[in-house]
Amino acid sequence: SPTIVWLRRDLRLADQAAFVAAAAAGPVIPVYVLDDETPKHRRMGAASRWWLHYSLASLDADLRKRGSRLILRRGRCETVLADLARETGAATVHCLRHYEPWWRNAERAVGEVLDLQRHHGNYLAPPGSITTGSGGPYKIYTPFWRALEARMPPAAPQPAPQSLPAPAAWPASDNLADWNLLPTTPDWAGGMRDEWTPGEAGAADRLAAFLPRARVYSERRNLPSVSGTSRLSPHLHFGEVSPAALWHAAAERGGSVGTFLGELGWRDYAQNVILQMPDYAGKPAREAFEEFPWRDDPVGLKAWQQGCTGYPIVDAGMRELWATGWMHNRVRMIAASFLIKHLLIDWREGERWFWDTLVDADYGSNAVNWQWSAGTGVDSNMFVRIMAPLTQSPKFDAAGYIRQWVPELAHLDDTRIHDPDVRPRAYPPRIVGHAEARARALAAYGEWNDRG
Ligand code: FAD
């Protein structure tokens, strides 16, 4: 009888343990279930759905080259998989493990109705397996990373199979176009089409382009005007490249790739956090922050979302995000700090906006980084450390970046572009002054702290 491979954020053929195990047992039926019910309010955001469409198309094409194909079904995963098993006579389902709280519930539900075999493969080490001397989970990144690094390298990655055994007959599949994952009108995805090639081949191209630059990563990663980072985050999120493959490819380069590997460690760390605190995107880890006097400011929120705050580096970042579904990490930190501290808006508003607009929107990584920026997390920057956007911008040499994303300022020279003294009429005035915003944030923090 055939075996089902249940795909989610692991849309690849290379180093994919579920395919290896299923193919060893006989005919394989690869299936992707579009399940908008199980995640409830955490259904995939719009930018992620755009990515998913192309990633599924790419995987189907890769499977067809190997005598196989991708079956698409829609609905609650345990119901859909049970139906598919009944139709095809499949006895076993293989999948990679995922750690978002809704996927953990779904794996439990599928395991109750079918023989579900779960494999490791989307993280450097299985989340939950890196523990302290006393056997508990780590809360803080640095000791977590030290313990994880001591377990490295990960097992050597397995190549993609040359062919996959097909079942005697293929079950029915939905038509990808009918899932309406792409925007219609307005079509906001033009910038994304220009920037990205979702799928395993696109991931391999990004990796090949990055590897020669891996040695200078630590010097360039904070400079938004240059291509200093890998831009692999959406490919990693959708599992189009395995972190083990990435580790080996980077480590083989030699030189100072440690900083880059440490960033991959943050990705594992975020899963370690949501495994301990599944509601990390909804609840501050430092619970007293539930009482923090966040401002209700829909006008400010909208200005931030649209890149119209009057702070060039913040606006450049927010516009890059809107256009391409991605933002440079340094600028994510500045933009997040601005929302939380300059505007005093609840970090959860920012988390939600990123969830909908990032092509790499990831439940664990997004929540961990937002709580870090807010100072509400287990391992956090302190709330009172307020990033000054007008200082950060020249410090990280963001002139070229601003010129690219804020055309109203493109004519200004490198010294004036970060903080224009004379503002072009087309560019919005500052939504709040820096000194005033800083004083307001510190006062709110002080009052809240005194009450606690
Ligand atoms: P590189 O610098 O090339 O790093 C390689 C890989 O390491 C990345 O692709 C990513 O998978 C991982 N990584 C790097 N930095 C981090 C980090 N701080 N936390 C977790 N993983 C990391 N990253 C996401 O993948 N999804 C998110 O939803 C997300 N939300 C964020 C929200 C905020 C407020 C901030 C400050 C950061 C967020 N990040 C998120 C982390 C980081 O900004 C991106 O992973 C990074 O910018 C991706 O670019 P890159 O692939 O070029 O990274």
Image (cartoon, rainbow, N blue to C red):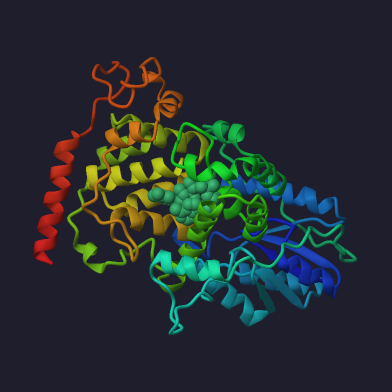
Q: Position of residue 93 (x, y in %)?
A: 72, 73
Quadrant location of the C terminus? bottom left
Q: Position of residue 179 (x, y in %)?
A: 63, 49
Asked whether 373 or 192 is in front, the reply is 373
Quadrant location of the N terminus? bottom right
69 on left or right of 223 = right
Number of residue marks: 0
> Toward which corner of the image does residue 4 lie, by quadrant?
bottom right
Q: Position of residue 433 (x, y in %)?
A: 18, 33
Asked whether 425 or 378 is in front, the reply is 378
What residue sits 24% from the left and 19% below the top?
421
Identify whether 206 is placed above or below 251.
Answer: above
Residue 112 visible in the current orientation = yes
> Toward which corner of the image does residue 342 lie, by quadrant?
top left
Residue extending farthest front: 255
Residue 44 visible in the current orientation = no
Q: Position of residue 215 (x, y in %)?
A: 58, 45
Asked whether 242 or 298 is in front, the reply is 242
What residue sits 76% from the left and 51% below the top?
60
What residue sits 51% from the left and 74% below the top?
130
> Toward which corner of the image does residue 407 lie, by quadrant?
top left
401 on left or right of 2 = left
352 on left or right of 432 = right
